[in-house]
Amino acid sequence: MAPAEGAGYRREMMAASRLELNLVRLLCRCEAMAAEKRDPEEWRLEKYVGALEDMLQALKAQASKPASEVINEYSRKVDFLKGMLQAEKLTSASEKALANQFLAPGRVPTTARERVPATKTVHLQSRARYTSEMRSELLGMDSAGEPQLDVRKRTVTGPRPGDEKQSAAELDLVLQRHQNLQEKLAEEMLGLARSLKTNTLAAQSVIKKDNQTLSHSLKMADQNLEKLKTESERLEQHTQKSVNWLLWAMLIVVCFVFISTILFIRIMPKLK
């Protein structure tokens, strides 16, 4: 390698490493901000996640990019943060909880100091927060944990035990519905996976049979071609032999006629 090419390669490696280092630093910052309690009008995290997407695309375009497993882990964490921000924009707590359940946090810690992936911790915190919000909505609580009383129905006494039991029953019913929905989706995905496996095996069997039939047809075609060549050679030899015998027979006939004519002329007397 020439010195100029070597220097260029080293600069490219340093640029790729610097880009990955900046991506890891920004990713750690986003994970820390996601774990904290943020103001609803906070906009920095969304901008940071957008910058993470741009840096990840640039890292994928690098010639000396990291291993595919590392790239996939970065993409998984960025997608988790993006999905978390989208879930926070939903209106009801039930929709937020349902969207949060479909998020997939990272599997590997971002830095060596982490024992558990930060995105997994954020996932558990958001799940607990959305569950608490669902309970508060069903029990008629505000964000501070105090009951929301209508002015027209405000009473001196506290909530009645029957209302609390009814709210708890409604909460259990909603949770049961979500669980049934998850089980239904899991069964549908399992059925689709089984159907895909069956179709794949059937297609594989058909393709295997077609390959066997094609191989047999090619073998038969080769055999027929060999037989055709052999018969063509035999026919050519037979044709050549027939022509030779006919030629010799014609020569013999011509010689016989010529000799007969000479003898006839010699033996027969001349006419006076």
Image (cartoon, rainbow, N blue to C red):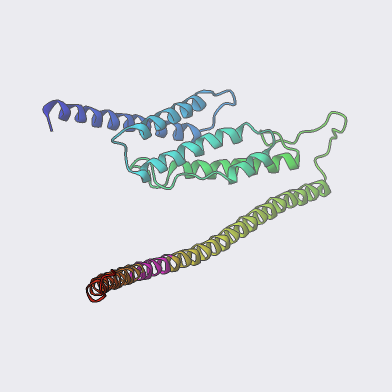
Q: Quadrant of the C terminus?
A: bottom left
Residue appearing at x 59%, y 33% in the figure: 86
Give the residues drawn in magenta, as a range: 218-231
Asked if residue 147 is positioned above or below residue 267 in the image, the reply reads above
Residue appearing at x 60%, y 33% in the figure: 88
**Residue 138 coordinates in the image, percent (x, y):** 74, 42
Q: Quadrant of residue 226?
A: bottom left
**Residue 263 coordinates in the image, percent (x, y):** 23, 75
Asked if residue 193 is positioned above or below residue 139 in the image, the reply reads below
Residue appearing at x 65%, y 33% in the figure: 90
Q: Quadrant of the N terminus?
A: top left
* Depth order, front residue of 214/156: 214
Q: Is residue 154 left or right of residue 37?
A: right
User: Magenta stretch mostly in which secondary structure?
Assistant: helix
**Residue 26 coordinates in the image, percent (x, y):** 40, 30
Residue 71 belongs to the span the image colors magenta = no
Q: Is residue 207 left or right of residue 145?
A: left
* Depth order, front residue of 237/32: 237
Residue 225 belongs to the span the image colors magenta = yes
